[in-house]
Image (cartoon, rainbow, N blue to C red):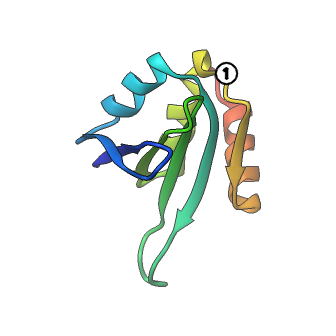
Amino acid sequence: MTTQIQDQNGNVIARSKNLRGILDRARRFTVDEVHCHELRPFASDLPEYSVEFHYSDKSIGFATFASWRVLAQFIRSRRSWRVNRILGHKPFLAELATYMAGQPH
C-alpha cells in the first residue's frame, strides 16, 4: 500500500509505503472527513476501497484498503480523530456503520 498526501492545490507533499504518513499528518491536523469509495474496475476483480482523509488544513490523504473490515477497524481505532463525517456510497456506508457499531474497541 502506498499512501500520499496532497495540499489544497493538489501538490503531493508526502508519500509513504504504509499508513504512517496518514497517521503522522493526523497528529498535526484534525481529520474532518473521511470519504470511502468501493473500487471494482472489472466485474471479476475483488473490491478495493479508496479512502480520502480530509484534514483541517485542507490537505487530503489518499489510501487504498483491500478489505472494508480492515478499513472499518482502522477508522474505528482512531477515536482521537473525532471524525465529523464519513461519506461515500450509501450501501457500503450502511454496512460499514453496522460493522463499526457492533464491534468492541
Residue, far left: 17
Residue appearing at x 47%, y 50% in the figure? 9
Q: Position of residue 101 (x, y in %)?
A: 74, 32
Residue, far bottom: 43
Residue appearing at x 40%, y 33% in the figure? 22
Q: Choose top left, top right, bottom left or bottom right for residue 54.
A: top right
Q: Position of residue 3 (x, y in %)?
A: 33, 45
Residue appearing at x 46%, y 18% in the figure? 28
Numbered disc 1: secondary structure: loop
Q: Position of residue 15 (x, y in %)?
A: 27, 42
Crowd class of label 1 (few under 14; some 14 to 19; many from 20; radius 10 Å): few
Left or right, 6 with reference to 16 = right
So how many labels did they put on this image? 1
Is residue 1 depicted above or below 76 in this figure?
Answer: below
Q: Choose top left, top right, bottom left or bottom right for residue 14.
A: top left
Residue kind at label 1, given as amino acid type = Arg
Residue at numbered disc 1: 82
Residue appearing at x 41%, y 45% in the figure? 6
Residue, far front: 9
Of residues 24 and 98, the one nearer the viewer is: 24
Left or right, 30 with reference to 93 = left
Viewport quadrant of the C terminus: top right
Left or right, 65 with reference to 16 = right
Of residues 63 and 48, the one nearer the viewer is: 63
Of residues 99 and 74, the one nearer the viewer is: 74
Left or right, 90 with reference to 32 = right
Q: Choose top left, top right, bottom left or bottom right for residue 81.
A: top right
